[in-house]
Image (cartoon, grey):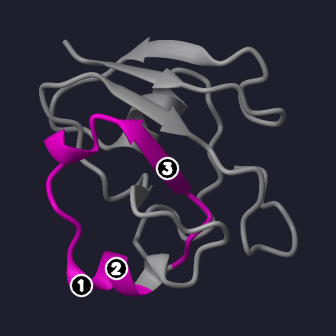
Amino acid sequence: MPTITFLPNEEHCPEGAVIEAETGETIIEAALRNGIEIEHACEMSCACTTCHVVVRDGFDSLEPSDELEDDMLDKAWGLEPDSRLSCQAVVGDEDLIVEIPRYTINQVSENH
């Protein structure tokens, strides 16, 4: 079972976290199941960028992003080459190291 290491994030996991993920689930599904409340204003439908993460290690093990995700990512705050929407990034067989950016483009946190 792969693990996802979340780097420390002041709001979502101040100490950082290492969680187990199921192959085939998305990064956000694993995070939410383990109490890491990544924002997801569009209810994980790939219609916003509030669940944007940067995959620091293991990026190549994820299924490639599609055109819709790429178009949404273009609007994300702090976009990097290894950015993904956590609602679209499906966990494979490799461990991941993930950073949750400090900001989103949302004006108000939805507190999901």
Q: Secondary structure at mark 2?
A: helix
Q: Which residue is mark 3?
A: 54
Q: CA distance from mark 1 to mark 3?
A: 18 Å
Give the vertical position of 91 relative to 70 (above or below). Answer: above
Residue situated in front as seen by the camera: 102 or 50? 102
As drawn, the label of residue 70 is 2
* Kind of residue at disc 3: Val
Quadrant of the rendered structure where residue 106 is? bottom right
Q: Residues within 10 Å of mark 2 (few under 14, many from 20)?
A: some
* Kind of residue at disc 1: Glu
Q: Which residue is mark 1?
A: 67
* Kind of residue at disc 2: Asp
Of tags 1 and 3, the one toward the viewer is 3
Task: Locate residue 112, reporting x and y percent.
Answer: 69, 50
- Answer whether labels 1 and 3 touch (C-beta < 8 Å): no
Task: Locate residue 40, reporting x and y percent.
Answer: 59, 58
Task: Locate residue 50, reporting x and y percent.
Answer: 62, 64
Q: Residue at x 65, y 38 (%)?
A: 37
Q: In the displayed structure, does residue 11 sit left or right of residue 8?
A: right
Q: Secondary structure at mark 1?
A: helix
Say if the magenta span includes residue 63: yes
User: Magenta stretch?
Assistant: 48-71
